[in-house]
Image (cartoon, rainbow, N blue to C red):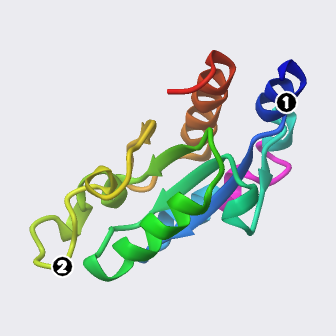
C-alpha cells in the first residue's frame, strides 16, 4: 500500500478539461507543461484518459451543456481524485457571470480541491496549485 501511495504522489497524472471561453487559461496550462517551467520535476504528466488521471484541471466557464460531460469525466476518474480549477471563468463564471446558461463556478457541478485565480493565471500559479495537490496526495486524500 505504501508503494502505491508513493507512486501516486511521485507522478501525478493530469487531465485537462477545456469547457470553452477565450482559451487564455488553456494556453497557460500548456505553457506550464513546457520544459521552461519543467512540470516534470514533480512527475506531472498530461494524460488523455480520465481512467488514468489523478488530477482534473478545469478551464473555462462551465455551461449547462458541458456540465453533464464534466461530471461524467469526474466520475470516471479513480480514487483518490483531485480537481484544480484554473482561471476566473472556472471559479465564478468570469465575464459570463450572470448568464442564463453559465454556472457561477465549477464547484456547483463537482467538488474542487484547489482554486487558481487569475485571468489568465500565470504558469507559476498553476504549478503552485499542482504542488498543493501533491501535498494533499501525500496527506492521503481530502
Numbered disc 2: secondary structure: loop
Report the residue marked by disc 1.
Answer: 4
Percent of width and height locating residue 126: 57, 42
Relative horizontal placement of residue 122, taking residue 108 as reference (left or right): right
Provide the residue span drawn in magenta: 30-37
Report the residue marked by disc 2.
Answer: 101
Residue 135 lies, with reference to residue 97, above or below; the image says: above
Is residue 22 in sight in this rendering? no
Relative horizontal placement of residue 18, taking residue 27 as reference (left or right): left
Residue 23 lies, with reference to residue 7, above or below; the image says: below
Residue 88 lies, with reference to residue 19, above or below; the image says: above
In front: 135, or 42?
135
- Looking at the image, which residue is at 31% across and 50% down? 107
Do residues under tags 2 and 1 come within 8 Å of each other at their CB atoms? no
- Looking at the image, which residue is at 59% across and 43% down? 81
Find the distance from the CA under tag 2 to the CA under tag 1.
41 Å
Amino acid at each position: 500500500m505504501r508503494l502505491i501511495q508513493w507512486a501516486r504522489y511521485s507522478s501525478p497524472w493530469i487531465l485537462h478539461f477545456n469547457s470553452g471561453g477565450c482559451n487564455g487559461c488553456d494556453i497557460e496550462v500548456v505553457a506550464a507543461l513546457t520544459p521552461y517551467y519543467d512540470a516534470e520535476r514533480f512527475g506531472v504528466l498530461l494524460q488523455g484518459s480520465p481512467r488514468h488521471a489523478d488530477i482534473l484541471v478545469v478551464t473555462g466557464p462551465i455551461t449547462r451543456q458541458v456540465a453533464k460531460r464534466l461530471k461524467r469525466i469526474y466520475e470516471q476518474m479513480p480514487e483518490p481524485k483531485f480537481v484544480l480549477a484554473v482561471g476566473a471563468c472556472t471559479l465564478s463564471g468570469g465575464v459570463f457571470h450572470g448568464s442564463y446558461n453559465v454556472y457561477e463556478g465549477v464547484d456547483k457541478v463537482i467538488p474542487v480541491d484547489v482554486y487558481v485565480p487569475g485571468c489568465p493565471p500565470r504558469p507559476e500559479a498553476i504549478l503552485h496549485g499542482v504542488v498543493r495537490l501533491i501535498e494533499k496526495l501525500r496527506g492521503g486524500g481530502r
